[in-house]
Image (cartoon, rainbow, N blue to C red):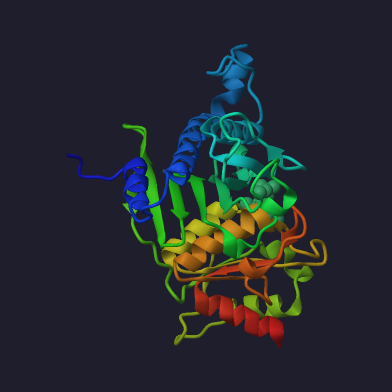
Amino acid sequence: MTAFKTLGQFIIEKQADFPYAKGEFSRLLRDIGIAAKIVNREVNKAGLADIIGSAGKMNIQGEGQQKLDVYADEQFIAALRSGGECCVVASEEHENPISIQSEVSKNAKYVVCIDPLDGSSNIDVNVSVGTVFSIYRRTSTSGEATSADILQKGALQVAAGYIVYGSSTMLVYTTGRGVNGFTLDPSIGEFCLSHPDIKIPTQGRIYSVNEGNYRKFPEGVKKYIKYCEEEDNETGRPYTARYIGSLVADIHRNLLLGGVFLYPNSSSHTNGKLRLMYEANPVAFIVEQAGGKASDGVQRILDITPTELHQRTALYCGSTDMVDKIEEYLQE
Ligand code: AHM
Ligand code: MG
């Protein structure tokens, strides 16, 4: 009897909550967990790529080294393809959705939207990167999945999660019944439940924003940043500024400690920078399930009706009271 619970054990236990479930969804989550471990192995060796390359060697798969974001994309798609529970994948790496229907997956019920390796510019400098994913139930009942199967509101997600490849590697996910976090124990190669039922504090003291873009931000955001910097004993200001530039890592820290993440629209990114389908929606679902809030400044992220696969949105997300305050400033 082990003292810890692995991701696999946890998924099976949770399946019992759905007596009519046939196990497809559990298998889908398990496949994502396996691909995450493979990507983790390569991300961990990122600094060695040149050394291996200069010796004229191949990587472990016997292929030449390739960019890690392409590698991650291939790994997740291969895992979903061989699992057979998913009929179509939308990935940041591809302009169009990838139909993965095959003999195995012809009745597959699920749709996956994924950013396989987010924040990949941070890899070269050994800073955390992540994977973010969203799972929907397919809406059409037969034939090839259509774009309508993918372009669903975030509120319809059946699950969402992220993997942060950081000082340790963690997988955090929700199926709409709270949020649970698993840390990869490299000695046994398993994600183990380390952060059960994560709750974000209602009010935090961290604000995360790329302040280099300050002059391009809407007036309300500028005022909020000034508010964070002011001194006030009662509210514990000035708040602490923390910004990694990897969405997953910034969200993960604020989820555990309390805080707010801002990626506003600006004069150079008129609709914001982050993508609704595979960055904002999954993060919003997780943060809401942990008791926080996610907004585009006006409306709930999860209520936005998507019109395009790669559509962008502003994102204000984290501790509820902090997001409320930003909305107040934006509406002034
Ligand atoms: P990417 O999908 O090209 O990696 O970009 C997304 C990343 C997020 O991880 C992060 O929150 C944001 O871009 C940082 O942007 P900036 O460098 O403009 O602050
Ligand atoms: Mg990205």
Q: Nearer the viewer, residue 253 or 174?
A: 174
Tell me if residue 145 comes above or below residue 290 in the rendering: above
The image shows residue 67 at horizontal and vertical percentages of 66, 30
In this rendering, is residue 248 above or below 216?
above
Residue 243 seen: no
Q: Position of residue 122 (x, y in %)?
A: 61, 44
- Between 290 and 144, the residue placed more toward the observer is 144
> Quarter holding the C terminus?
bottom right
Could you tell me residue 197's position as x and y percent? Answer: 36, 61
Residue sitting at 47 percent across and 42 percent down?
24
- Tell me what residue is drawn at x 70 percent, y 85 percent: 331
Can you name the residue that lies furthest to the front here? 142
Q: Position of residue 188 (x, y in %)?
A: 32, 32
Q: Residue at x 61, y 47 (%)?
A: 111
Q: Identify the residue at the far left of this view.
A: 1
Query: Is residue 324 at all visible to an observer of this figure?
Result: yes
The part of the image, by quadrant, that contains residue 72 is top right
Q: Residue at x 58, y 53 (%)?
A: 136
Name the side, left or right, on which 73 lies relative to 269: left
Quadrant in the rendering for residue 276: bottom right
Return the residue found at the far top: 56
Considering the image in quadrants, where does the N terminus appear?
A: top left
Rendered view: 199 above or below 34: below
Tally the marks. 0
